[in-house]
Image (cartoon, helix red, strand yellow):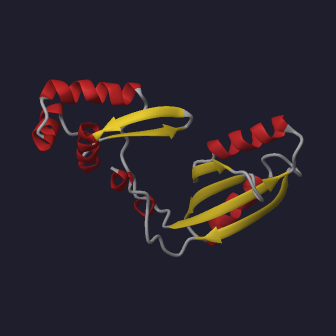
Amino acid sequence: MENVGIVYGVEQKVDAKDKKILKVLFEDGRMSIADIATKTRLRRDSVARRLKKLRKDKVITGFVPVINPPALGYPNIALMLFRVKTGNESAKKKFQDKLVGNKFILHISKLIGKFDFNCAVIYENTNHLNQIVEEIKTYVPNFIDNFELFQVVDEPKFEKMSDLL
């Protein structure tokens, strides 16, 4: 059975064998091709070929460690929604670039609707969060029309892409 979907405007084809490989990689992204072949019961050359294709097709975009922010001293997460003033695309681009450059912002989404940007921010304590907010306000003076801040108290589900396989 083959699934076809659109990811970031690109059609992707992932079959059952690819899904087996991806599930195994979720266990350990550093696993050798030989170990993946053993766990999936696929031939080593097939695994190597499929991994190369999955990377080429941007199904796999990289292998990175998953870091636990509290272990680095950032036990808190907040979600920030920003509505910015319209009409000035260069200011919007500058604002976005500054958000991307902020090391405490883990995720940024551009939105359609009441707000233009959504950011997930990690922080030490409320004082630190206030400093981050005040810094963001200076990125492009008088550009933020409105923002809302939500402090995360619990994460009943965190992205576990392996569940999609």
Compare residues 64 and 58 and report the one nearer the observer: 58
Give the residue at the far bottom of this rendering: 153
Residue 73 vs residue 82: left or right? left
Examine the rendered structure and indicate whether residue 41 appears above or below residue 120: above
Q: Which residue: 69% across, 51% down?
A: 111
Q: Which residue: 23% across, 38% down?
A: 17
The count of marks equals 0
Q: Is residue 61 visible?
A: no
Compare residues 28 and 53 and report the one nearer the observer: 53
Residue 112 vs residue 46: left or right? right
Which image quadrant for residue 13? top left
Q: Is residue 55 visible?
A: yes
Which image quadrant for residue 3? top left
Give x and y (percent) for residue 86.
87, 46
Compare residues 105 and 47 and report the one nearer the observer: 47
Please state, as top left, top right, bottom left or bottom right, where the N terminus lies in the image.
top left
Give x and y (percent) for residue 113.
75, 56
Compare residues 81 and 11 and report the one nearer the observer: 11
Examine the rendered structure and indicate whether residue 109 appears above or below residue 61: below
Q: Which residue: 23% across, 43% down?
A: 20
Give x and y (percent) for residue 38.
10, 39
Give the residue at the far front of this rendering: 1
Residue 86 vs residue 53: left or right? right
Residue 11 vs residue 120: left or right? left
Which image quadrant for residue 61? top left
